[in-house]
Amino acid sequence: MELKSRREDAQQESMGILATESQTINAELDKEKRRQQRKEEKRLELEQSFSYRTCKGIKTVMDDYFIDPLLGFIPGIGDFISTPLTLPYLYVALFKVRSLPLVLSVIYNWLIDACVSMIPFVGNFIDFFYKGYKKSYQQIVGYVEDDAEIISEVNGNAVKVAVLIVILAVILYYLYKLATT
């Protein structure tokens, strides 16, 4: 009789533990569902924003239609036009997505593009293959769509990118000095 009672107690205790774990799992699933819902609402809001659509339009015109490298053939004009076009990307990365590593990556992409375009003659041709606006746009989209691979890549490279930005800024300065002398 005592064995049967212990067995029943153990079964009831197991059922209580299972019920508690089930409630915990359900609570966590609900919490994750709400997080995903908030993330989706934020994504939709961002995709409908003027600044995000501007980034997409700039990417399309400058990189997909090859306007960026074509402008590079006009001395002084290409860099004068393309530099301010990076501002919407910086705005989205900093104020909409709120990611410092993403901001650094956008700056890095712009600096690479600027350095390449300042190399006399050859740089304009290389610019046909390096698509800085497209890369920045893809990184922003990756953050918005919660793409773990892109987020991990950008976050993992943040320190390296910060150092490279300083190096590229110095290179850009000397290329500018060379071009203007």
Image (tube, rainbow, N blue to C red):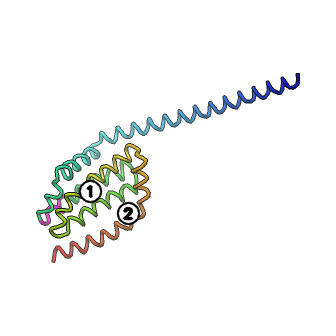
| Residue 147 image point, x, y percent | 40, 46
The residue depicted at 17 percent of the width and 63 percent of the height is 124
Quadrant where the image shows the N terminus:
top right
Span highlighted in magenta in the image = 75-81
| Residue 114 image point, x, y percent | 24, 64
Q: Residue furthest top?
A: 1
Residue highlighted by disc 1: 132
- In the image: residue 143, left or right of residue 69: right
The residue depicted at 26 percent of the width and 48 percent of the height is 55
Is 135 placed above or below 169 here?
Answer: above
Residue highlighted by disc 2: 161
Q: Nearer the viewer, residue 13 or 101?
A: 13
Given the image, on which type of amino acid does mark 1 rest?
Gly
- In the image: residue 111, left or right of residue 144: left
Q: Earlier in the sequence, mark 1 or mark 2?
A: 1
Rounded to the nearest whole Å, what is the CA distance between mark 1 and mark 2?
Answer: 14 Å
